[in-house]
Image: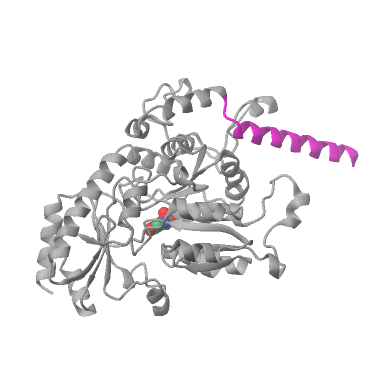
Amino acid sequence: MINKIKLIKKIEVVLIKMDEKKENPSQIDKEQREKWDKMRFETQLISAGEDPYPETSHSLRTPIYATKSYTYSSLSELLKNRYFYSRTENPTLYALDKKLATLHGGEKAISVASGMAAIHLACSSILQKRVERIRPKKIKNLLPQTRPNEIPNMIIHLNQYTGSYRLFTKIYPQMGIEFKRINMCDLKEVKDAIDEQTKLIYVETPANPTVDILDIQGCADLIHEVGGKCIVDNTWASPALQQPLKLGADLVIESLTKYINGHGDCLGGAIIGPANEIRNIRYFWLETQGQVLSPFNAWLILRGVRTLSMRMARHSSNAIKITQFLLKHPKVKEVIYPGLKSHPGYELAKKQMRNFSGMIGFELESEVECNKFIELLKLIKVGVSLGDTTSLIEYTALMTGIDLASWERKSMNISNTHFRFSVGLEDPQDLIDDLDQALSQI
Ligand SMILES: Cc1ncc(COP(=O)(O)O)c(C=O)c1O
């Protein structure tokens, strides 16, 4: 029995040492990061995370490591290395993690299977009690706190991606986490909603699908007063346009599926933030839940992200041209774009973003016209998702909004005549011509 306890203790020590080793950057890691931090953003996009190594045969491009595990001839050799099992560590994913951490100015990043996986992992790490994977005694303290006066809550905006909305309003309450859904455009409402049990404020800006702009710095300052954390979903801006960690956010989420990959050929997600937080997500939450990004998808995303800056500039300039066209068209009832002075978040967007991105909302007069319009489009593709080379338009109530009850859509300001337009990289005149021919026939 005593020998068994000794063996377990020895294994625990080995695991702790391994985690510490993985968490603490080596001298080479530190020097590389310092080098990348000195680069300007466009150079970081190309170079950060991707130095050719002797062990990768000085390959210019990061190879795809298609492996589930790593083998060593001895325990001491294993301890010297940081690779163990591909659920938590893989060199292709590490290259992407290092690039994303550098681009956001965060200590560390972790890339995972999808944007939704990133959202759930990040929120889990903040809302639920922290556990060390190797300390079983602490497991009884796991989530959720059950005494009524200790029920944790999170603050969410009226609008966010429907998947996140479902997670926060339909699943987390079953896990003992309450939500307070308010108009976060108004910081006074945010201040009034925060109480001692508020653990998290969730900021998605620009917000899907209504393109609301939320004040990252303002929300972060308010939640920090009660010791809570601020997560920002940065998917509609990408680090090329907005860097929330520099505005006081604690963790940033990106759906890599969208602008960061930018080519519409795979899904991915990422969380960027302090090293201890990312370590907890990697070695407890991801290791336990398993939402792993495939090395092939990591490689595709590494390939896509290198052109992010150029693409975001073009998405934004195309969107401005299309907005100008829609504003003048008699069949268009309303145009919603943060680059318009008429948008309530225009000044804030100018302050916290570098450009206004490629997402437009617009409204037609009637449902009959909406149905005709969507059928008449020839070049612009009708489909969900956003942020890639190809323009994608969705009839919101019938597409991403289809799972919502009509009262829910109403509470989100999603009318039955709303379109969400992800402006691609085509020639803007071709997009305008297509919109024009469809609108003129409805
Ligand atoms: C703002 C935002 N966050 C997260 C997601 C989810 O990302 P994924 O599809 O990669 O899970 C989406 C999807 O549209 C989104 O728009």
Image quarter for ligand 1 equals: bottom left
Give me the residue at 31% from left, 45% from top. 354
For residue 425, above or below residue 106: below
Q: Name which quarter of the figure residue 179 lies in.
A: bottom right
Q: Position of residue 256 (x, y in %)?
A: 40, 48
Give me the residue at 10% from left, 72% from top. 441
Residue closer to the observer: 337 or 273:
337
Hey, which residue is sitting farthest right in the picture?
Answer: 2
Q: Position of residue 280 (x, y in %)?
A: 61, 45
- Look at the image and give the residue range highlighted in magenta: 1-26
Q: Name which quarter of the figure residue 401 lies in.
A: bottom left
Q: How is the image coloured?
A: one colour
**Quarter of the image where the C terminus is located:** bottom left
* Residue 10, magenta (yes or no): yes
Q: Position of residue 309 (x, y in %)?
A: 30, 40
Q: Main secondary structure of the magenta part?
A: helix
* Residue 126, magenta (yes or no): no
Q: Position of residue 282 (x, y in %)?
A: 58, 44
For residue 351, above or below residue 89: below
Q: Is residue 114 among the parts visible in the rendering?
A: no
- Horizontally, residue 28 falls left or right of residue 304, namely right
**Quarter of the image where the N terminus is located:** top right
Give me the residue at 65% from left, 36% from top. 19
- Horizontally, residue 44 falls left or right of residue 342, namely right
For residue 370, above or below residue 32: below
- Horizontally, residue 174 falls left or right of residue 236, namely right
Residue closer to the observer: 399 or 226:
226
Residue closer to the observer: 396 or 273:
273
Number of numbered tags placed on the structure image = 0
Q: Is residue 104 among the parts visible in the rendering?
A: yes
Hey, which residue is sitting farthest front in the picture?
Answer: 188
